[in-house]
Amino acid sequence: MERAELLRFCGGLNEKEWGAASNAAGWSVQDVVAHIGATCRSFFTPSVVTMMRMRDLERTNDLFVERRRDQPVARTLAEYERWSRMIGVAARLPLDWMRLPMAELGWYPGGMMIAGAMAFDHHTHLRHDVAPALGRPIPGTDANRMAVVLEWMFAVLRNQLRVARPEWFDRPVTIKLEGPGGGTWSVGPGGRVAAGPSDKPVATITGRAIDFPEWATHRADWRNRDVQISGDAEYGTRFLDIVRVV
């Protein structure tokens, strides 16, 4: 669904819009599509080794984009069309028996990494980096897509907390995301993330599922979105300030 959404969107772009700045810092609209295409391709080529072993995913993404920056739009779109189709095929395979690394983001079941990471990439870039930068209507979403995006984001958050282990984060919080695809998650010390509310959470954070990909990636400040904290507001604020899913 996200592939079809992006192809429909790209089909309506003119030359000026392809070269326009997106909301992804330093990237044009064409750069964003090149990034998604390069990531799709990397799962099926030796580039996957780079993606798995690099310790800075954002720098890796920049390198992939820089290699494609001077190519024609048609070539960018053709690469995306070809390799995103392969992602669709791979996403239907039973690959969760494998565990694969993704740069500094840690290890994930193979199926989740292919389907989840790419759904998140498509969904977030199109709705928060490309469409608003061009002043175009934001494409809609639904519960199924949001659920896949959120599953991936909480998996990344789990690994990030396991690595960072902030000393002050010693008690759990509950995150409740409302609307299509939403739900409730317990987030605790050491990267303990599970569906359902925390047992006696220090703070409960409530927001909209549709907004989570924007503020949890630092594309927007959570303070400027419909996010509420109940319980220990200081603890909840401190937690929200360290959340940055990439």
Image (cartoon, rainbow, N blue to C red):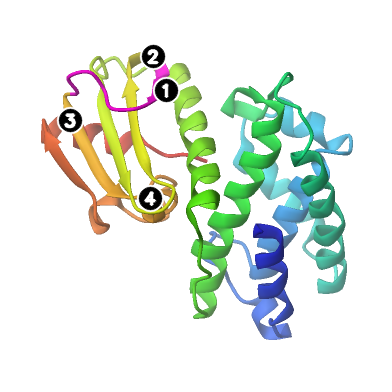
The span from disc 4 to disc 2 (Cα, nearest Å) is 24 Å
Earlier-in-chain disc, 1 versus 4:
1
Residue position marked by numbered label 4 in the rendering: 209
Residue type for callout 3: Ala
Q: Is mark 4 on a helix, strand or loop?
A: helix
Task: For label 2, count other residues whose C-alpha is less than 10 Å away and answer few (under 14), some (14-19) or many (20+).
Answer: some
As for residue 96 lying within the magenta part, the answer is no
Circles 1 and 2: CB distance less than 8 Å? yes
Mark 1 vs 2, N-terminal side: 1
Q: Residue 200 location in percent, x, y?
A: 17, 19
| Element class at badge 2 | helix
Residue 169: image location, x then y, percent? 27, 19
Q: Distance between the residues labelled 1 and 4?
A: 21 Å
Q: Are marks 3 and 1 in contact (CB under 8 Å)?
A: no
Q: Position of residue 51 (x, y in %)?
A: 73, 34
Label 3, residues with CA under 10 Å away: few <14, some 14-19, many ≥20: many
Residue 194 lies in the magenta-colored region: yes
Q: What residue type is labelled 1?
A: Leu
Mark drawn on residue 203: 3
Which comes sooner in the sequence, label 4 or label 2? 2
In front here: 95 or 203?
95
The circle drawn on residue 161 is 1
| Measured Cα–Cα span from mark 3 to mark 1 | 17 Å
Q: Label 2 is placed on what type of residue?
A: Gly
Looking at the rendered structure, the kind of residue marked 4 is: Ala
Q: Mark 2 points at which residue?
A: 190
Q: Residue 147 carries which label?
A: none
The tag earlier along the polypeptide, 2 or 3, is 2
Residue bounds of the magenta highlight: 191-201
